[in-house]
Amino acid sequence: MVRSRVAIIGLDGMSWDVLMHYLEQLPCLRNIISRSFLGLLKCIPPLTPPSWTSILTGVKPQKHGILSFVKYKTCRENVHYRFYTSLDVKAPRLSEILAINGFFSLVINCPISYPLSGWYLERQIIVYDISSPKEFICPSVYERYLKYFKYIHALKARSNIEFLEQTCKLLELRTEGIEMLLEETNPDVLVLIVSETDTIMHRVPVIPAGKYVKSFLKILEVIDELLKIVAKKFDVIILVSDHGLRLFLKGLNISKVISDVESIKPVHLRKVLLSLLSTNMVTGLIHYALLTNIWTYKLAYKFRSFIRKFTGKRAVKRDRRIQRIRPDPIDAADAMILYFSSNQTMTTTTERLKYTLGKYIIEMQTIRNSDDLYAVYIVPQEGLYLNLDPLHSVNRWDILWFPSARHTIYGIFAWYEKGLIEKPTYIGVLNNTDVLPTILARLGLPIPSYTDGKVIALPTISKQVAGQVDYRLIRKLKMIRHKMLYRVQ
């Protein structure tokens, strides 16, 4: 029986609202989507590392261990943090599971890929990701292709036009390298994540705000050319994103709840007046008008900085004790993570949040981050983002009227197979943990016994899966053997 070749293409931060603006000018992408099973991919939390890890492992962050960009740990009444590494990923990724089953994979820009000692490396090629501190391709015999894989974080563009032009050149270079790698290695499965889409939309927020930007179209045209190459070699193409990006008009002010728990006072009158100004409807409208205009959106940030400038030192002086509350430093998402060194403090804060803002919150999950640290995910209602700015801890409003372009929990999902259907078919809202078991079922492989996802009902997938296996144990045993055979970084 001939194996189906599968390509998973990740468009970081892409949402259907943004993609549909440009679809008519992207012939290959339009052809794929017009013949696909389409859905919304629900990603909680909508942060890049935990969401991509959930997509590629089939389990929630509580099981795979990646909660955000950084990992916190308490030590002698201080809180330390470091970036997550591949050694922190507790569940095997898709390419590792496929390697166990005899499939050969090419993995490009998979988040948290460093160091290689955290991977089961047989039957796969791994190209480093954008957050990796070191450039590598494993096996090292393919290192001659490193010159084609440069990422956007290395750019120092003076303007957004220069930034987009350089990004386009890097993507064209990477497309050339991917094409040559595919020709030489002929993998069964391709896992490719394009992170530039997210980076650009953060830097140019008018794009998720709904404005048509020609320079962004050029980036998408390069991605479209890449998809043409992929479509010639693979039978199944799966388009996914780890979250969406959109413009939120209102924010949920949780700063006041945190300040109540920590009993922080006094507050200067000047800070109170400026905080009232920052939540005023008129000020919000000015901010919105600046943010959503291609020529003036940079002024929106200066406008907000102007208000912050006069707040002096931080309006909130956080408690230095072991029980202090630590927010995640990543200010992106319509979801937020709060860290606690005390279970009691965490319980008090979550109860206060439920009591005061419960009507605005749709999900709140508590997670044991380590032996001495706890974490809580907070997800507000659709259309609201969360705000933990000390500037707003002094006012009593639940809703803040500052528009902001932020992450949304709904990414894209499109499942394309050659000759399967001739028109788009909507299959509803899916969880990001559903992607891995569905791919394994499509390839006729056992799904993980520990997965939090389910197999999506598609015509080419049998209703009865080939069984369930604990791939965590198998990977652990095979990695012991693997480390004796390979020299890893």
Image (cartoon, rainbow, N blue to C red):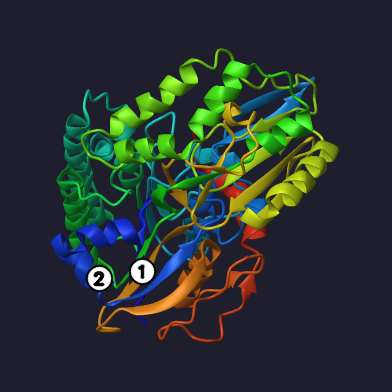
Label 2, residues with CA under 10 Å away: few <14, some 14-19, many ≥20: many
Type of amino acid at the residue the image marks with label 1: Ala
**Circle 1 sits on which residue?**
414
Q: Earlier in the sequence, mark 1 or mark 2?
A: 2
Quadrant housing the N terminus: bottom left
Q: Do tag 1 and tag 2 residues touch (Cβ < 8 Å)?
A: yes
Q: Would you say residue 299 is visible in this rendering?
A: yes
Task: Please indicate whether residue 381 sits to the left or right of residue 402 in the image.
Answer: right
Name the amino acid type tagged 2. Answer: Ile
Q: Secondary structure at mark 1?
A: strand
Q: Is residue 257 above or below residue 34?
A: above
Q: Nearer the viewer, residue 89 or 10?
A: 10
Rendered location of residue 304, percent (x, y): 42, 27
Identified at 36% across, 69% down, the residue is 414
Residue farthest to the top, as pictured: 312
Instruction: Name the spot of residue 385 as percent of width and height, x first.
Output: 52, 46
The quarter of the picture where residue 312 lies is: top right
Element under disc 2: helix
Horizontal side, residue 123 vs residue 63: left or right? left
Q: Residue at x 81, y 36 (%)?
A: 345
What's the mark number on residue 32? 2
